[in-house]
Amino acid sequence: MSSTTNPKGQGLQIPTDQTTAGGENRRDAQKRYRIQAVFWCIGLLIFIASCIVIHFHPRPYPFDVATTQTVQGLHLWPWLNSLVQLPSVLNNPIPSAVALIMWCVGLVVVGFVRLLRKLPAALWFMAGIFLALTVMTSAGLNVLLDIIIGRPRPDPKVYHIHLYTPLVPFPTYPSGHTEHDVAYYGFLLYLSFTKPVREWRYHWLLLPFQLFAIYDIIAIGYSRILEGDHWLTDVLGGYLEGALELFFFIFLFRFTITWYAKHRAKRRAEKAVQAR
């Protein structure tokens, strides 16, 4: 990123009346933030209402059962079936943990490399920390919500559906796999579209990942219904929960980098005064 406030690029800028710490136009950014905050509050109210309704009405709705039966009755080609189920496989505990660690370590390593080259590095360290914080916090909250709401898993002995994985004793609303992928891949997508990354010389190398992330977020819901692990309402709740957590941590990330940029600018100004 090249500017008068950040000449070395790909780091934090000093916030001004015209630009944010991320280098975006401040007026445009504030308009987007206000709109996002309104939609976030509306989404939160809808999600809370859905949790209350499902808690007192844990049985699946007729359209839940009908959706599962329709999806499982499509009989996709084996290769397409495997492709659709891939997001669920990657979301299993070991693969998802390994992937998260690799991404966080990768972001921190980039930060250290830039630090050794005397280039702005704070943004990369913060990105790694916030990625881990987003995924781990959202996962913990999902487990807590599952326990509080207490909706039983789809049971093929009760409903005319197929279950392609072992029946687990954990509650089902909202879908943890769906929530995880929205928060995890959503935050990575957000990072890939920030201005420092967009202005990276080789940003086009991220295109395959961006396409896969979008596919995974879309396909994970279908995959959970296909495997018989969740009802449609579980998946929709997972999407909403994941989106709420994703945007909350994006707001927090923006606030943190802005605070840090202002704090750093203040310290530099104080040192400059002392040096005179």
Image: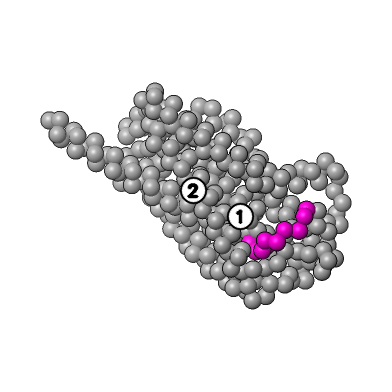
- Estimate the x, y position of residue 28 in percent, counting from the top left: 42, 49
Q: Nearer the viewer, residue 108 or 171?
A: 171
Q: Is residue 129 left or right of residue 240?
A: left
Mark 1 neighbour density, 10 Å: few (under 14) some (14–19) many (20 or more) = many
Q: What's drawn in magenta, residue-wise?
A: 165-174
| Mark 2, secondary structure of its residue | helix
Q: Is residue 225 left or right of residue 31?
A: right
Q: Please tell me which residue lies in front, 84 or 141.
A: 141
The residue shown at (62%, 37%) is 209
Q: Which quadrant of the structure image shows residue 160?
A: bottom right
* Quarter of the rendering containing residue 156: bottom right
Q: Position of residue 251 (x, y in %)?
A: 44, 52
Of helix, strand and loop, which one carries label 1? helix
Residue 79 position by quadrant: top right
Residue appearing at x 70%, y 67% in the figure: 152
Farthest-out residue, front: 169
What residue did someone put label 1 on? 179
Determine which residue is flagged by label 2.
133
Callout 2 touching callout 1 (CB < 8 Å): no
Whether 173 is among the magenta residues is yes
* 2 or 1: tag closer to the N-terminus: 2
| Horizontal arrangement in the rendering, residue 90 relative to residue 35 (left or right) | right
- How many tags in the picture? 2
Is 54 one of the magenta-colored residues?
A: no
Residue 180 seen: yes
Label 2 to label 1: alpha-carbon separation: 14 Å
In this view of the protein, which residue sits in the foreground, 163 or 30? 163
